[in-house]
Amino acid sequence: MKMPVNKERRNNKRCCPELSGITEVTVRRLAWIMNVSMGKALEIIVRSVPMLLSSEKICTICKDKKCLVCAFKSGSVIPQKIIPLLYKP
């Protein structure tokens, strides 16, 4: 029996990354401390990376030139409740 295709899902370009064991455990613990889902925690982590790297270097090697949707061009924003969690006591 063929399952119906969900048009919304088919057009959704999101991916579910396969994480190694240690990475999955790390993301899970970060999600717990942030009180969010693992997917949301991974999103916060990825959105935080542009603050740590040189946008000039990234832009130089960029292959798709989608600058309007790029965190390296527009700047990255971390939710306010997460900022205190970034620092060791």
Image (tube, rainbow, N blue to C red):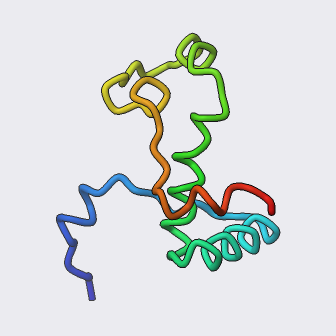
| Residue 53 left/right relative to 77 | right
| Residue 76 left/right relative to 17 | left
Give residue 74's position: percent from left, percent from top. Answer: 39, 28
Q: Residue at x 57, y 48 (%)?
A: 46
Q: Outermost residue, bottom direction?
A: 1
Callout count: 0
Q: Residue at x 59, y 15 (%)?
A: 61
Give residue 14's position: percent from left, percent from top. Answer: 40, 56
Instruction: Give the quadrant of residue 2.
Output: bottom left
29 to 9, vertically: above or below: below
Q: Nearer the viewer, residue 25 or 63?
A: 25
Q: Quadrant of the N terminus?
A: bottom left
Give residue 54's position: percent from left, percent from top. Answer: 64, 21
47 to 34, vertically: above or below: above
Q: Outermost residue, front direction?
A: 89
Q: Quadrant of the C terminus?
A: bottom right
| Residue 19 left/right relative to 83 | right
Q: Nearer the viewer, residue 47 or 4?
A: 47
Give residue 62's position: percent from left, percent from top. Answer: 52, 19
Q: Residue at x 50, y 57 (%)?
A: 43
Q: Residue at x 21, y 72 (%)?
A: 5
Q: Nearer the viewer, residue 25 or 53?
A: 53
Instruction: Give the quadrant of residue 82.
Output: bottom right
